[in-house]
Image: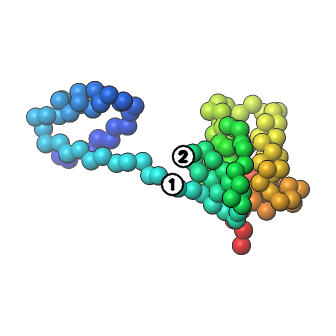
Amino acid sequence: MNEIIVIRAADPDGSMFRAIMDVLRDRKAEVIELAAPSLDAFTFGEIAIYPERRTVLKAGEEVRLNHGEFSVLLLLASAPGQVFSKNQLYEAAWHEEYRYGTTTVENIIWRLRQKLEDDPKHPVYIKTVIRSGYKIELPR
């Protein structure tokens, strides 16, 4: 019987990996290392998001975003056209359950529109989907 075991863990010194390989030494084991895919940038219109550097450019100029703004924008940009609920956006930014009644997500969306849209009252990129959430819409 062939088994596939996938392990993902923080192992800065490699000790966990060596211990696992010691256990598997007498068995036929093949190790395949997979590097995490590196995405250079998400781009839409004149906006470019560089996840690894946590940097956003608009028309080549850096836009300063706080942690929550960047996290929400990155999630939206990772799946253009997909609608994300306030709950999903909140959890992506703060890794905790969304508290209903808070306007945190709405405030972040407002600030993102102020920073990224040419006309924040008539957004081209960050769209509201009534009673559902928000999405990134790619320009045509």
Residue at the front extreme, as displayed: 61
Q: Amino acid at mark 1?
A: Leu
Furthest toward the left, the residue is 26
Q: Residue at the location (38% across, 33% down)? A: 9
> Marks 1 and 2: CB-CB under 8 Å?
yes
Q: Position of residue 75 (x, y in %)?
A: 63, 48
Q: Nearer the viewer, residue 66 or 139?
A: 66
Q: Is residue 84 left or right of residue 118?
A: left
Q: Position of residue 83 (x, y in %)?
A: 69, 54
Amino acid bearing label 2: Glu
Figure coloring:
rainbow
Residue 131 seen by the camera: no
Q: Residue at (89%, 56%) from the top-left corner?
A: 121
Provide the residue designation for mark 2. 52
Label 2 sits on a secondary structure element that is helix
Mark 1 and mark 2: Cα distance apart in space: 8 Å
In this view, which residue lies farthest toward the right?
Answer: 121
Number of marks: 2
Few, some or many residues within 10 Å of mark 1 (<14, 14–19, 20+): few
Q: SS for tag 1?
A: loop
Mark 2 neighbour class, 10 Å CA radius: few under 14, some 14 to 19, many 20 or more: few
* Sequence-first tag of 1 and 2: 1
- Res. 91 image quadrant: top right
Q: Position of residue 120 (x, y in %)?
A: 85, 55
Residue at left 20%, top 33%?
A: 21
The residue identified by callout 1 is 39
Q: Residue at x 82, y 33 (%)?
A: 101
